[in-house]
Image: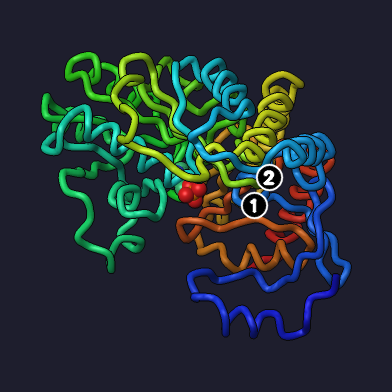
Amino acid sequence: MKYPENIFKKEEELLLQTYKRIPIEISHGEGVYLVSTDGKKYLDFFSGLAVNALGYGNKKVIQAIEEQIKKYIHLSNYYINSPQIELAERLVKYSGLSKVFFANSGTEAVEASLKLIRKHFGPEKKIITFSNAFHGRTYGSLSLSGKEKYKKYFSPLLPNIVQLEFNNVEQLEDNIDKNTAAVYLEFVQGEGGIQVTSNQFADKIIELRDRFKFALVADEVQCGIGRTGKPFAFNHYEIEPDLVIVAKAIGVGLPLGALITNKKYENVFHPGDHGSTFGGNPVACAAGLVVLNEVFENGLMNNVARLGEYFKSELNTLRKKYIQKINEVRGSGFMLGVELFKPCESLVKSFRDRSILVNCTNGNVLRILPPLISTKEDISIFIKEFNEILSPDV
Ligand SMILES: Cc1ncc(COP(=O)(O)O)c(C=O)c1O
């Protein structure tokens, strides 16, 4: 279908202007490519912000959705729906935790975790978050945010939330005590610029948790489900979080989020404490089963680990070549960041002019989030174009 000429004007007229949209009209997707209405094919290394793990038009996903739609699209959580149970079983298995609450999104899963923490620890104990953290846009998750620009118009936010510097071990030691209820951590910060938790930082959190018995909450919304080459980003460390939050890729494009708890916290909520009309929608859960199967059982995660290393080493080769332009390459698997010395918005435009979609976050970090099905050839195309973009002596 061709979009009407004035679609962008209409967008401005009709929608609250909360997004700065990319000025291309997408017709459809094919594998790792998005095709625009003017017939241009874009290599999509943004994958709907780490959602489209299996790219576009995956036949197994379509089949699972079709089959479930024919049975029932929605029941309400007054009934058991079997895709939910099957998906919970998988999430428990891969995370090593014990029970699941389903929501519709990342931020809603974070809200569920906050209510659980407050119920268990009471209102006075503090919750620790970190600079540049991002946990969502609703009031609770926004209160955890480490980015002032997202919070500045919206106070009062939740009380008793203390923000520390990410990866600053001393600050952990100085601020965490017996009055700490929880520590929220993205083991790899996404929005914050692909910042990776250091081993010393993770070790100190484990040591302090042993001492003060707070809950460690891993926000794996962006970095989970195989994206970093391991099931969850916390699997890169010797650590078992108490609560794990997932979303984005688990619905492969359908709205789905989940809070997973360990045994210690599995009985905090009682009927009526929390709920959601659509949370754990059966169609989304049926799609989620496909992605978990592909990532964990059919070898996709191992490909991501292997190709992610190749990708990172190629990016580091570019860094050596353009040492005056690239400061650092970070991340693992298919969650990679290239920190530049200058803002990267214009770089994103240069990529788009060369038919590649990629993102810029935190001002100067090129955030690369390819679909997990991307191949070595796809990566080579990206590297070749990046090299050409960087090569002019400007
Ligand atoms: C780490 C992290 N947590 C939470 C969220 C919020 O998820 P959602 O946008 O599905 O509400 C995001 C979204 O980008 C995220 O990256």
Amino acid at the residue labelled 1: Gly
Q: Position of residue 245 (x, y in %)?
A: 45, 33
Q: Regarding mark 2 in the picture, which secondary structure is present there?
A: loop
Image position of 28 with respect to 305: above or below: below
Image position of 262 with respect to 51: above or below: above
Instruction: Give me the C-alpha separation between circle 1 and circle 2.
Output: 6 Å
Image position of 242 with respect to 33: above or below: above
Mark 2: C-beta under 8 Å from nearest atom of ligand 1:
no
* Residue drawn at x 57%, y 23% as measured from the top left: 85
Circle 1: is it few (<14), some (14-19), or many (20+) Cα within 10 Å?
some
* Residue drawn at x 32%, y 35% as measured from the top left: 272
Amino acid at the residue labelled 2: Asn
The quarter of the picture where residue 28 lies is bottom right
Q: Regarding mark 1 in the picture, which secondary structure is present there?
A: helix
Circle 2: is it few (<14), some (14-19), or many (20+) Cα within 10 Å?
many
The quarter of the picture where residue 267 lies is top left
Q: Which residue is mark 2?
A: 52
* Residue drawn at x 64%, y 28% as measured from the top left: 83
Task: Point out the image quarter for the N terminus.
Answer: bottom right
The one nearer the camera, 386 or 287, is 287
Q: Which residue is mark 1?
A: 48
Task: Point out the image quarter for the C terminus.
Answer: bottom right
Q: Is residue 244 left or right of residue 38?
A: left
Q: Is residue 235 left or right of residue 169?
A: right
Residue 309 visible somewhere in the drawing: no
Q: Position of residue 158 (x, y in %)?
A: 21, 50
